[in-house]
Amino acid sequence: MTAVFDYGAGNLRSVANTLESVAAPFRIVSDGAGLESATRIILPGVGHYGQLLRSLDRLRVREILCERIAAGVPFLGICLGLQALFESSEESAEQGLGIYPGRVVRFPSDARVPHMGWNCLETLGESRLLRAVGAEPYVYFANSYFVPAPDAIGNAAALCSYAGQSFCAALECGNVFGVQFHPEKSGPLGQRIVRNFLAVEPC
């Protein structure tokens, strides 16, 4: 069963709608027991980096989430859910999950933020998550912070550019996947990406 984790501010309804549209069984969970029984985990992200990490700590699930990821359970972090996989962010003093080294940064002060709307992905080689999405897939973004491309080298499945910045738009390493864009707002292509994630077998 796929668990969609509710930390109090995620875009749960849109994610649930997408899962329903692809006929995928799922549960919305908000505690460690829900994560421990899950065969796949989705962490949606809308809001503030610090709020998300504080919520995980308040709910006492940070350690369980990291343990489940380490155990090979397929994990998908969406937008802020991707950013939480890294060590830290300019948005807040809270420490991230630290699954990957690197720091999330803000777009330059002269850029129009948030970066919002449809942008093209630069895919990087073979990807289970982005299988059959086409050569120049357009997806929907809504973010003011990003993981710089150099911090994601080796794990990036796709890049995107905005305001002169090249950043990680999708990452993939073993059972861990993350997207800076919102597949739940990216129409049929987003549904394809969700289906691809649901097809991943545990490590």
Image: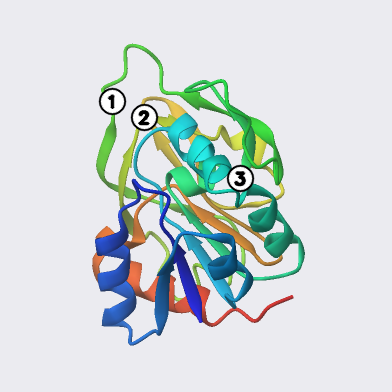
- Left or right: 101 with respect to 193? right
Position above or below: 150 against 42: above
Of label 1 and label 3, which has the lower sequence position? Answer: 3
Q: Secondary structure at mark 3?
A: loop
CB-based contact (under 8 Å), mark 1 and mark 3: no
Q: Quadrant of the C terminus?
A: bottom right
Position above or below: 183 against 148: below
Q: Which residue is mark 1?
A: 113
Q: Residues under labels 1 and 3: Cα distance?
A: 22 Å
Say the numbered circle drawn on residue 85.
Answer: 3
Instruction: Tell me where residue 88 sits by quadrant.
Output: top right
Identity, as a three-letter code, of the amino acid under mark 3: Leu
Say the numbered circle drawn on residue 144.
Answer: 2
Say the numbered circle drawn on residue 122.
Answer: none
Of label 2 and label 1, which has the lower sequence position? Answer: 1
Residue 173 in percent (x, y) is at 69, 59
Q: Secondary structure at mark 1?
A: loop
Residue at position x 73%, y 70% in the image: 72
Instruction: Tell me where residue 28 sits by quadrant.
Output: bottom left
Q: Considering depth in this image, is 124 or 2 the residue closer to the camera?
A: 2
